[in-house]
Amino acid sequence: MTTPSGTVADAGQDNWLDRYAPDPIKPYGRLARWDRPIGFYLLFWPCAWGIGLAANANPAMGFGWWAAILMFVGAILMRGAGCTFNDVVDRDIDAQVARTRSRPIPSGQVTTRQAFAFLIAQALLAAIILVQFNAFTIAACIGSLVLVAIYPFMKRITWWPQLFLGLAFSFGALVGWSSQTGSLDWPPILAYVGTILWVIGYDTIYALQDIEDDALVGVKSTARLFGPNVRAVVAVLYAGAYVLWNAAALLAGTGVIFATLALGAAGLLAWQLGTLDIERPKNPFQRFYNNHYVGMILTLALLADWVW
């Protein structure tokens, strides 16, 4: 897999970072995946769900728009910091995989020390966002950093690294709710568990892109673990996620509006599985990316039910 000088193989061609960013900024933007916003979208949507569930549980409190804005910015920073840390840890593995060997560290665009300094800068900015919230939410977010820190190592020791990604990436469902209430309850807990299943499912689809290289390098993943049963297992995961999301919404006080609009998300999940084709190079990534719209639909469904 060859790319123009400095670009990254798994980034979209002619993306905004490569076109418009100053040259000294580009390698750091690539480390943080600014050229691929899907990651911070998927990190943000569970935060919005938590806020939306809290709004439906207490309609007079309203939808936490300011919290949503802060969490969106925080998602960009924390996703960037997580990707930077992941690239530091995986720099030797990335050099052996066609899709990732053009990333900034293995391709020599930045040094490991420079990447680590950039990681610290992003974490400090995220800390400024974090202290705007209540003490319970701050403590929960700090606790989630353990999951972020261990995730890059999981592909070396377990067939379930996607589970650990799910534990970290789903945390927004808890902090979105707690940012509004200062505590936890069953709706965000059910949403959190459901989102973990969703993340395992969509990241398994994402991992199908690297299944051959992963086998050669010795990297473990649920895509390799599920093998020929990957479609069926992801279907079970998606179904479980959908049931738990609806249970969370019902406990939070939503009604027919959420249940009806959420069917759109179910339709997208079914489309992903029905059209998944590992033999077509871009097919798994397109199905993975489609989960951005799943997150958007569920957020709008919660918002619409609250407005009604």
Image: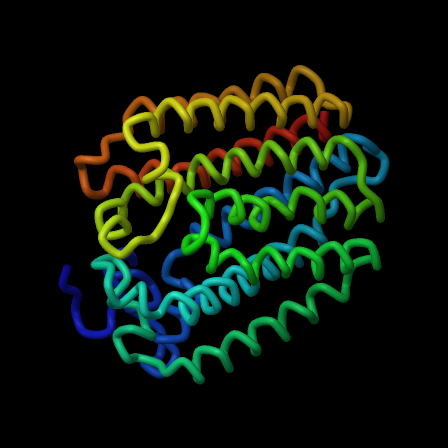
Q: Nearer the viewer, residue 63 or 98?
A: 98
Q: Is residue 42 above or below residue 141?
A: above
Image point (36%, 74%), residue name: 21
Q: Horizontal placement of 280 versus 48: left or right?
A: left
Q: Nearer the viewer, residue 219 or 181?
A: 219
Image point (40%, 67%), residue name: 87
Q: Nearer the viewer, residue 25 or 114?
A: 114
Q: Horizontal placement of 133 versus 146: left or right?
A: right
Quadrant where the N terminus sits is bottom left
Q: Image quarter for residue 204? A: top left
Q: Position of residue 177 (x, y in %)?
A: 75, 43
Q: Image quarter for residue 8? A: bottom left
Q: Is residue 16 above or below residue 46?
A: below
Q: Horizontal placement of 153 versus 185: left or right?
A: left
Q: Position of residue 248 (x, y in %)?
A: 69, 27
Image point (25%, 57%), residue name: 99
